[in-house]
Amino acid sequence: MSRAGQGGTVEPATEASIDRAARVLLAGGLVALPTETVYGLGADAAQRDAVELIYATKGRPPGHPLIVHVPDVAQGRRWAQFDARAERLVAAFWPGPLTLVLPRAPAAPAWACGGQASIGLRCPSHPVARALLERFVALGGSGVAAPSANRFGRVSPTRAEHVVDDLGADAPLVLDGGAAEVGVESTIVDLTRGRAVLLRPGRIGRDALEAVLGEPVAERDDDAPRASGTLAAHYQPATPVELIDAGAIDARAASLGGDGVAVWSGTRPGHAVAHWEPAASDAAGREAALYEVLRRLDRLGLRRILVEAPPPGAQWAALRDRLERASHPG
């Protein structure tokens, strides 16, 4: 498989580096690109060897589907079939942190879809991602498959340096677009069946989706297509994570021996711990900090990371989802 453009260099996102990155993609190589959610490990979705290189680099299980990134709806139509519901959602939320799972277009290759009859599509809003996708299309490309740029199952990268830290010698050219603004992966909605189904919560919440669709959005069920980031154990640092109610943190820290414990919570623990990381009071603030904080606490090499469970409420759904997966015993 081609490894054109490999080397693990982090480059500021300039017109020249974006052009180079687009040409690396066309040559069958990988590029790590910033998006508003997390950094993605991109490859030309139309080249089978390039897509397989994503799986090999991440250690991603074969058949685990990818999300194809496009600069606009016109390119999206080359990959998927849009119905009226999809048209309404993309008009409202693209470019942005929304992935739609749609019936695969007849010409779309199966290797970009995990072998399924459906495909995940997203149009990111980050200016560097958009510039790269537009240049890629101008040079003759169409869609870029781009899961998170980290080892499979581990903490997603929200900064360029996270990609190099995680992938090491396997890191490709990395375009530095600064810290990801949203900080958690996109909302995923399945539109392949009679009803819309929320496969993964994200910044765009159920209420916003239902307001645009004019119909309820159902919960994920056993018949849902496979989708990125929906395994029970995911987004995990090496240090075990426990999700715990705020009122139980002190007792749990004491039972573990506070000197081996890090805590991420809204208020300082009453029991002495090795490290306390203050958490924002709002959902968006905690989402933006989540993966950065998990990486930072993991580097401390302690026995346990205790994380305050988010309060109830729809605005906390994405954070709750990621933390439940990060703390799953898996």
Image (cartoon, rainbow, N blue to C red):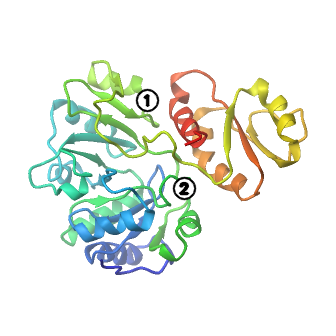
Residue 78 position within the rendered picture, expressed as x and y whole percent measured from the top left:
14, 53
Residue reaching furthest left?
106
Residue placed at 31% from the left, 66% from the top?
52
Q: Is 123 situated above or below 197?
A: below
Q: Is residue 16 left or right of residue 300?
A: left
Residue 272 position within the rendered picture, expressed as x and y whole percent measured from the top left:
91, 40
Quarter occupied by residue 41: bottom left
Residue 251 position within the rendered picture, expressed as x and y whole percent measured from the top left:
84, 29
Q: Note whether residue 31 is visible.
A: yes
Residue placed at 59% from the left, 21% from the top?
312
The residue lying toward the viewer, choosing from 52 and 171, is 52
Residue type indicated by callout 2: Thr
Residue 81 position within the rendered picture, expressed as x and y whole percent measured from the top left:
14, 42
Name the residue that disc number 2 marks: 158
Q: Is 210 situated above or below 145?
A: above
Instruction: Check disc 1: other Cα within 10 Å, few if <14, some if 14-19, many if 20+.
Output: some
Q: Note whether residue 276 is visible.
A: no
The residue lying toward the viewer, choosing from 69 and 328, is 328
Q: Secondary structure at mark 2?
A: loop
Q: Is residue 51 left or right of residue 16?
A: left
Quarter occupied by residue 134: bottom left
The residue lying toward the viewer, choosing from 228 and 330, is 330
Name the residue that disc number 1 marks: 205
Q: How many marks?
A: 2
* Separation of marks 2 and 1 at Cα, in angstroms: 21 Å
